Amino acid sequence: MSDLQEPISTETALRLLLKQQRRQILRRVAETSDGTTVDQLKKHLGGEGPMNSDANGSVENRGIELHHVHLPMLQEANVIDYDADQSIVCRGQEFQNILSLLEVIDGHREDTSTELS
C-alpha cells in the first residue's frame, strides 16, 4: 500500500467547517505554531469556569463533544494530529488546506457584511 493519501475532498472540507466548534478549534491551532492542549481548547471554546455552565450541563457536553466528536473527526481527515494520551493537538497534513478555506469563508463574510451596512 502507498503512503500517499488523497487530498481532502471539498465535501469533507465543508463538512468539517460546518460546526462552529471545529472552526474555533482550527483558529486556535492556527494561533499556536507548536500545538495546543485539550484544556486550552476547552478554555478557548468557553468550556471552563462556573460562569459558563448552565442547568443543561453545557460545559460537560462541550468537553465530551470535543473529545468524542470534533477532535476525532478533524484527526480522521488529517487536519490535526490528536494525541489523546498526552492531550495535545497539533497541525496535521491537511491543516493548511482547511485553514485556507476557512479564511476565504471568513473574508467573504466580512466583505458581505460591510457591503450591507
Image: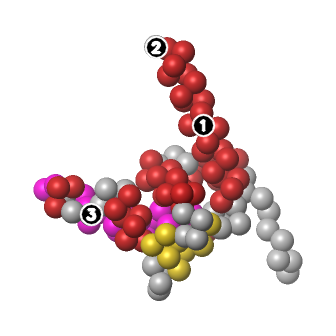
**Extent of the magenta region:** 54-75
Tell me what residue is drawn at x 50 percent, y 76 percent: 88
Query: Which residue sits furthest left?
Result: 55
> Which is more N-terminal, label 2 or label 1?
1
Tell me what residue is drawn at x 24 percent, y 58 percent: 58
- The span from disc 3 to disc 2 (Cα, nearest Å) is 35 Å
The number of numbered badges drawn on the structure is 3
* Residue type highlighted by circle 3: Glu
- The span from disc 3 to disc 1 (Cα, nearest Å) is 28 Å
Residue 52: which disc? none
Q: Which residue is mark 2?
A: 117
Q: Is residue 77 left or right of residue 29?
A: right
SS for callout 1: helix
* Residue type highlighted by circle 2: Ser
**Residue 59 sits inside the magenta stretch:** yes
- Give how far across and how far down residue 54 sits, in percent: 16, 55
Q: Residues within 10 Å of mark 2 (few under 14, many from 20)?
A: few
Asked whether residue 73 appears in the rendered view, the answer is no
Asked whether residue 100 appears in the rendered view, the answer is yes
Q: Residues within 10 Å of mark 3 (few under 14, many from 20)?
A: some
The quarter in which the N terminus is drawn is: bottom right
Q: Which residue is mark 1?
A: 105
> Which is more N-terminal, label 2 or label 3?
3
Q: Is residue 70 left or right of residue 99?
A: left
Q: Nearer the viewer, mark 1 or mark 2?
A: 2
Closer to us: 42 or 60: 42
